[in-house]
Amino acid sequence: MKKLLTFIAITGLFMLGTQAIVKAQDNAPEGIDTTTVVETDTVDVEGAAMAPTAAVEEEVSMHQQIKIKFIEGGPGFMASILIVFIFGLAVAIERILYLNLATTNTDKLLSKIEKAMEEGGVEAAKEVCRSTRGPVASIFYQGLDRASEGIDVVEKSVVAYGSVQMGQLESGLTWIALFIGIAPMLGFLGTVIGMIEAFDAIQAAGDISPSLVAGGIKVALITTVFGLIVAIILQIFYNYSVSKIDKLVNTMEDASISLIDILLKHNLKNN
């Protein structure tokens, strides 16, 4: 339930941000001073004062160009690619936040567990795990909960619950991979349909006009460009999440071995 609420919240923020950007693009040209200069002889101070305005006009012009390209690509396909980008980015950010929160200082946790076992036994060590956030602490708790059944049972419990935690870490990556594949596919589909429309226009005109062919091909390729850009951005987030998961899995494996060593040491002391 928490993951669903987080995903909805992130998606809502991206939708609101997209609407704000579109409104800013629509209102930006109206706030710019477009008064022409009648006098041709101006001093350097006036030229310096007009420099920031020129920079603003250039920046707004770039935003307007992006908006024009978006419209030229076709509202249907471009909107679909934008929706894929928003949902993919929302899932990617949710995964990154979850993985960062799942990171635990295992050395500090192991020292606390060892100290707790020396002072209060297994129950005190379990309390330390309960008060610590992250998959490593959860694995430790499952192992300590079966400490009375022997080291073999503890090892099996740690391995089994470690697989469960690894599955939870990897959940959501399939959706990011799906969005990475869908974005360029939508772009290619828009390109193919745009090419078909361009050839239909040529057939209707009865003549191959260079401007007609070039315009149709340009519009058709815009969807491919946007789809590839979305796929590249999401691929970066996907690879970061995979590397983060690999690092967490290696940490869990090393920490589990250290936990078994602590339990063996504790049993030797009792003996």
Image (cartoon, rainbow, N blue to C red):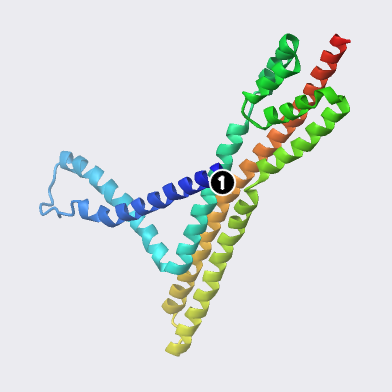
As helix, strand or loop, the secondary structure at mark 1 comes to helix
Establish if 235 lies above or below 145.
Answer: below
- The quadrant of the image that shows the C terminus is top right
Q: Residue at x 62, y 42 (%)?
A: 241
Q: How many neighbours does mark 1 have within 10 angstroms: few (below 14), some (14-19), or many (20 or more)? A: many
Is residue 222 visible to the viewer in this orientation of the structure? no
Question: x%, y% of residue 143?
Answer: 77, 27
In this rendering, position of residue 65 left or right of residue 132:
left
Residue situated in front as seen by the camera: 53 or 102: 102
Q: Is residue 19 left or right of residue 249?
A: left
Residue 34, quarter of picture: bottom left
**Viewer-nearest residue: 90 or 205:** 90
Q: What residue is drawn where x is 52% and y is 75%?
A: 193
Quadrant in which the N terminus appears = top right
Q: Name the residue at 42% across, 77% down.
A: 211
Q: Give the camera-side residue of 45 and 139.
A: 139
- What amino acid type should be assigned to the residue bearing mark 1? Ala
- Can residue 42 be spotted in the picture? yes
Which residue was labeled with disc 1? 92
What residue do we see at 56% from left, 60% from top?
A: 183
Direction from residue 126 to residue 150 in the image, left or right: right
State whether residue 187 is above or below residue 61: below
As displayed, is residue 92 above or below residue 225? above
